[in-house]
């Protein structure tokens, strides 16, 4: 139990006393264990626990939020009083008794071996194996760093509609970065698989192969020439290639932006916004998905939300505040880094679904262009959809064949335009894991897609 559930109605009533029409409590206890590898040895081991509570109240679309680490009755009441005072209105009638109804959660994300039950040495050995495999991959690998991570997060959500629900989520991840050096020049590679699983995650992936992947990418980039610049046809591979949709289009479909008229996708429900080959989905229910959970951070069940179907915009991702602003139902997308952040609408596991094109046909169709085997990070303006993304590993395509590697490539465009210009969608859907930053902090998200072809896009290079 994170907090004494008997005092929750009293805390909610105090939060409502400032004239609110709705109030909510979010309590969290998270334990994060991380191990870092640097310079050929384990460099740091940390085991951190955070615990706290956030109290939020609404008047229409006005919200006030406060948080505290003091989870005593007095501490929680002080937090609620600060929320009520900020509302600035006195309730004219006494608040009726708040009756909470505990709601059972159907746990779809079972864990076989909890990380907390496993010795630190076992986790450190996994990390050593991955980083050693990277270092031994090639004599040109000059440096290898790595991180093992597991997170055990329990939340409680209660509100004045009578909701009282708790949930627990486990996440585990391994990240390896390698640097290849020659003649004073350095190039890097990285691999970072993760899942909403316990230690059984390492039965599904090989730490050694994770390290080798990072090293191979670094060596490839070290030996590559710079990518030429210009507009060209680009094939973007599956997995983390889906970061293009996540950043360039996904954020523009969150109520955070749509609800205040700050998105290029405002007012386009039911309209064709993409090539008819594109169906895009945000699905927080994927079993053991990196971005999955049983409930969102407002206590709503997560959902499979079809955002775009055959090129038609079908839905947005909507939290409670967005629901009030937009007059549309919540979609189970409310998320936050921890109790210190007010929640907002966020993606979970977001991907372009498999299409009808054969992967070999996509490459064969390109006379001259770029094959983006792995994408890196980038930036986007949700209002205009303008984006710029780095290609971590790329190759020139000539006459339908993948040829020499190139480095330093970037993809530049707008979300609305790339949705129209994706004209082939393959059949090898896969996802990649990352952390997404927004106004409610950093949250784990999956991105994904099959191999796709963009008929034309600006490629930055030399």
Image: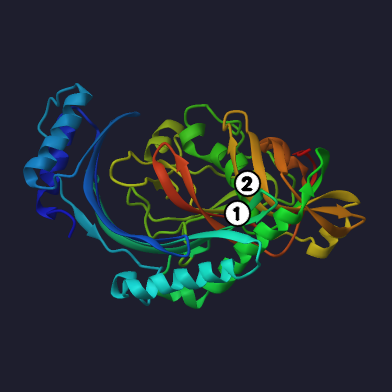
Could you say where residue 337 lies in the image, as x and y percent from the top left? Answer: 36, 46
Q: Position of residue 455 (x, y in %)?
A: 82, 45
- Is tag 1's residue or tag 2's residue first in the polypeptide sequence? 2
Q: Residue furthest toward the top?
A: 88
The residue to which callout 1 is attached is 351
In the rendered image, which residue does mark 2 sit on? Answer: 245
- Find the distance from the CA under tag 1 to the CA under tag 2: 7 Å
Q: Which residue is drawn at 18% across and 52% down?
A: 100
Tell me what residue is drawn at x 50 percent, y 32 percent: 257
* 87 lies left or right of 427: left
Q: What kind of element bears circle 1? A: strand
Structure colour scheme: rainbow
Quarter of the image that includes the N terminus: bottom left
> In percent of the image, x 16 and y 30: which residue is there?
82
The correct choice, above or below, for 364 with respect to 137 in the image is above
Residue 99 vertical placement versus 196 (above, below): above
Query: Dot 2 surroundings within 10 Å: few (below 14), some, or many (20 or more)?
Result: many
Is residue 162 visible to the viewer in this orientation of the structure?
Answer: no
Residue occupying the far front of the picture: 183
Residue 161 seen in the current view: yes
Left or right: where does residue 331 sit relative to residue 3?
Answer: right
Residue at x 58%, y 46% (from the top left corner): 246
In the image, which disc is placed on residue 164?
none
The one nearer the camera, 41 or 428, is 41
Label 1 Cα crowd, 10 Å radius (few <14 / some 14-19 / many 20+)? many
Could you say which is closer to the camera, residue 442 or residue 82?
442
Residues at discs 1 and 2 in contact (Cβ within 8 Å): yes
Image-quadrant location for residue 402: bottom right
The x, y position of residue 225, in whole percent, is: 79, 49
């Amino acid at each position: 139990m994170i907090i004494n559930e008997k005092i929750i109605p009293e805390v909610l009533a105090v939060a409502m006393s400032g004239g609110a029409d709705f109030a909510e409590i979010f309590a969290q206890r998270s334990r994060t264990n991380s191990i870092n590898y640097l310079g050929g040895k384990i460099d740091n081991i940390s085991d951190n626990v955070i615990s706290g509570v956030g109290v939020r109240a609404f008047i229409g679309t006005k919200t006030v939020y406060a948080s505290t680490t003091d989870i005593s009755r007095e501490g929680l009441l002080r937090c609620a009083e600060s929320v009520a005072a900020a509302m600035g209105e006195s309730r004219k009638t006494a608040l009726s008794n708040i009756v909470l109804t505990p709601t059972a959660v159907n746990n779809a994300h079972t864990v076989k071996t909890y990380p907390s039950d496993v010795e630190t040495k076992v986790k450190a050995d996994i990390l050593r194996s991955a980083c050693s495999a990277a270092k031994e991959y090639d004599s040109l690998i000059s440096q290898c760093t790595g991180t093992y991570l597991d997170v055990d997060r329990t939340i409680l959500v209660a509100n004045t509609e009578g909701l009282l629900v708790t949930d627990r989520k486990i996440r585990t991840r391994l990240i390896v970065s390698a640097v290849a050096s020659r003649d004073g020049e350095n190039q890097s590679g990285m691999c970072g698989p993760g899942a909403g699983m316990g230690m059984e995650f390492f039965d599904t992936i090989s730490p050694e192969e994770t390290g080798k992947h990072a090293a191979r990418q670094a060596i490839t980039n070290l030996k590559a020439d710079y990518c030429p610049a210009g507009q060209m046809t680009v094939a973007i591979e599956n997995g983390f290639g889906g970061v293009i949709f996540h950043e360039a289009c996904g954020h523009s479909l969150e109520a955070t932006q749509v609800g205040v008229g700050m998105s290029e996708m405002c007012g386009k429900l039911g309209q064709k916004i993409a090539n008819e080959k594109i169906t895009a989905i945000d699905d927080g229910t994927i079993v053991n998905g990196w971005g999955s959970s049983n409930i969102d951070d407002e206590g709503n069940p997560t959902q499979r939300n079809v955002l775009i179907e055959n090129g038609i915009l079908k839905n947005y991702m909507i939290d409670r505040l967005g629901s009030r602003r937009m007059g549309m139902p919540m979609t189970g997308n409310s998320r936050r880094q921890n109790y210190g952040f007010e929640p907002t609408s966020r993606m979970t596991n977001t991907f372009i679904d498999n299409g009808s094109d054969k992967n070999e046909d996509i490459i064969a169709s390109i006379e001259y262009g770029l094959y983006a085997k792995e994408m890196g990070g980038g930036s986007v303006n949700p209002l205009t959809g303008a984006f710029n993304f780095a290609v971590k590993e790329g190759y020139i395509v000539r006459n339908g064949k993948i040829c020499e590697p190139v480095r330093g490539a970037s993809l530049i465009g707008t979300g609305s335009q790339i949705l129209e210009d994706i004209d082939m969608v393959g059949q090898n859907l896969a996802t990649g894991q990352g952390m997404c930053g927004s106004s409610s902090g950093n949250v784990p998200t999956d991105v994904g897609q099959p191999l796709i072809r963009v008929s034309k896009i600006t490629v930055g290079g030399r």
